[in-house]
Image (cartoon, rainbow, N blue to C red):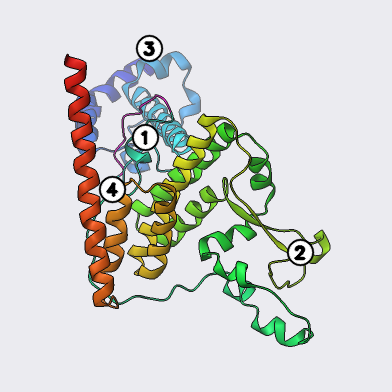
Amino acid sequence: MQKNQNNYQDDENKENIFPSTNNISDQKSSQNLILQEAPPTDQIPNGHKNMTSYTEEDKLKCPYFQMQQQNQEKAQESLLEEKTNDDEQPTSSSSEDEEGNKKNQKGGCPFMPSERKKNPGLFHLEYKYNIHYISRHQYLLDSDPLLIQQNKKKKIDRKIFNSYPIYLKHTIFHDDDLMKKIRLKEITERFFAYDKFRERGNRYFNKQKITTALYYYERALSCFKWLELIDEEDEKKKLTTFTDNNIKLFDGENLKDCNDIDLRFSMLVNTYLNLGICYMVLYNFDLALISFKDAYKLHQKGSIILLRMAQSVLYNKNSSFQDLKQAQQWLDLSLEIKKMKRFSIKTRKQCLEL
């Protein structure tokens, strides 16, 4: 009885020592405290220092012990929530935008581009002089140091190899196991690997990481068109001079299905456009024009391709008067093709209405 009376007295005096339980919860919510430290020993109510002397029933009756137990449970829950949030945090930015806001996940056909899969659109650049592009593999592609050491009497033919653009030469170094497996697949299966590389390239392009975007666009190109070193495996480990004899171009496979041909055709055109846009942003206008011309060879009725070709000349301060006249012709042809497309769409609608 005396022990219970002391407990009741402690409960009555508790209001003088601590604020009420409701005030504590209100104060805690107002301050947004997740973890609350235990009060100092001089503020612990009388008779609560020796906690081992109380039974579980007494602790359930005491508001002080209940408050401590609630704080411990909330602390454990907050730690558990932080751990789960860290585990569930995505490693890529595919589900979030640049500001960190969650995007609505959209499902559907992979052939229909979503918001994050769209290729770089139209934009304006500053007028600048052309900057010469230096490849990250330039020391391997440059043959001069090796040709000096070799027999000068031996003729080395590199005319065809030198005619290849730099983004096609980079496919020589895409000889990892993943790319080898992709190239052995059918065209329709290669599309999904291509789309992954293209999507990553678009993501890095939107983040203004142009060189990284170029790398993934080159990987996407390497799924359908690439150069390969045909020397022995031991020779690959050495510093080899690339010539027309040891480099083979894999292009225009013997495809018979019309759908496969159209799919490969479309993927190459899109890749050339993406590569050219990256070179334009880096002010490598000459290389951008080469990439756009490769796309134009495949699709001569593309108004966007002609517009890009004209842009690569107009933004280049090194362009001559003849170059500007040629760019004007490309713009006129682009507008003409655009008008023809609109006219054909309009006539189709009228025919359907009839």
Q: In the rendered image, which quarter is residue 351 located in?
A: top left
Sequence-earlier tag: 4 or 3: 3
In this view, the residue in front, 314 or 4, is: 314
Task: Report the predominant secondary structure element of the magenta stretch.
Answer: loop
Q: CA distance from mark 4 to mark 3?
A: 96 Å
Q: Residue 44: which quarter of the image?
A: top left
Kind of residue at disc 3: Met
Q: Could you tell me how far apart the alpha carbons at marks 1 and 4 are, in whole angstroms?
A: 20 Å
Residue 92: x and y, percent?
44, 43
Q: Which residue is mark 2?
A: 236
| Location of mark 1 (residue) | 113
Q: Is residue 74 above or below residue 39?
A: above
Three-letter code, disc 4 = Ser
Label 4: few (<14), some or many (≥20) within 10 Å? Answer: many
Q: Which marked residue is nearer to the observer: mark 4 or mark 3?
A: 4
Crowding at dot 3, Cα within 10 Å, few <14 / some 14-19 / many 20+, comes out as: few
- The residue at the point 64 percent across, 47 percent down is 179
Residue range (magenta): 100-109
**Circle 4: element type:** helix
Tell me where residue 56 appears, x and y as whole percent. 47, 16
> In terms of sequence position, does the residue under pointer 3 or pointer 1 come before the other?
3
| Res 201 visible | yes
- The 10 Å Cα crowd at callout 2, few under 14, some 14 to 19, many 20 or more, is few
Q: Which residue is mark 4?
A: 303
In-front residue for pair 1/304: 304
What residue sits right under mark 3 in the picture?
A: 1
- Contact between marks 1 and 2 (CB within 8 A): the answer is no
